[in-house]
Amino acid sequence: MTAKSILILGGARSGKSSHAQRIAESVPGERIFIATAQGFDDEMRDRIARHRADRDERWRTVEAPMDLIAAIRANDGSERVILVDCLTLWLSNLLLAERDLDAETHALAALIPTLGATIIMVSNEVGLSIVPDNALARRFRDAAGTLNQRLARICEAADFVVAGHPIRLGAS
């Protein structure tokens, strides 16, 4: 049986989105993809188009670059599978909009255990590299690490994807 709440972590282009989609497609139910990306430039618009092309007609897409919690609530249901891709883009959107990151991440963590849907969330692990050289980047890195830790504690499962290979993380 698949866990009802799964956090998928990994670096850029590690295969985490593909892994998350494979898990979601193995679970019966209506599939909802909640996208947090915004196509502000050609490269990001191309990336969004490629991700959308990877999903077929079995998927319904909901755009939620800022109001992720409301989008999850609106699409919850016991016969549904929600795939959120990705939490770090959502966090970046919130940071740039000067929203309260701690309150938003706390609200997301509080929501997850109440859901009837299976939820799979993709997030970048950004803490494995050098310390950023500016305050904004350090604030983002720290907020992403806090979000990932908070969600890993409440999710039933967490996978770390490296070079396309998922590793199931264990409880500490």
Image (cartoon, rainbow, N blue to C red):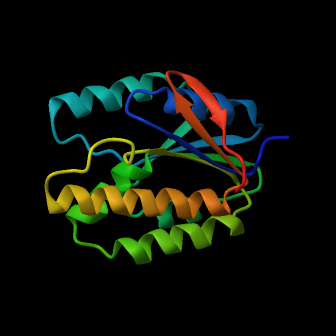
Spot occupied by residue 24 in the image (x, y as percentages of width and height):
66, 36
Q: Is residue 81 left or right of residue 121?
A: right
Report whether residue 66 is seen: no
Quadrant occupied by the C terminus: bottom right
Tally of numbered discs: 0
101 left or right of 85 in image: left
Q: Is residue 51 above or below residue 124?
A: above
Q: Which residue occupies the foreground of this view, 120 or 139?
A: 139
Name the residue at 40% across, 74% down.
102
Residue 152 x/y as whole percent: 60, 56
Q: Who's the residue at 59% across and 29% down the image?
A: 19
Question: From the viewer's perspective, is 39 left or right of 110?
Answer: left
In the rendered image, the vertical position of residue 151 relative to residue 98, given as above or below: above
Quadrant for the N terminus, please: top right
Residue at the (38%, 48%) spot, across then down: 127
Provide residue 125's location: percent of width, then percent of height.
Answer: 43, 44
| Between 93 and 48, the one nearer to me in the picture | 93
Give the answer, above or below, for where 17 lies relative to 4: above
**x, y (%) of residue 84?**
51, 47
The reply to whether residue 22 is in sight is yes
* Of residues 30 and 45, the one drawn nearer to the viewer in this rendering: 45
Taking 88 as reference, is 111 left or right?
Answer: right
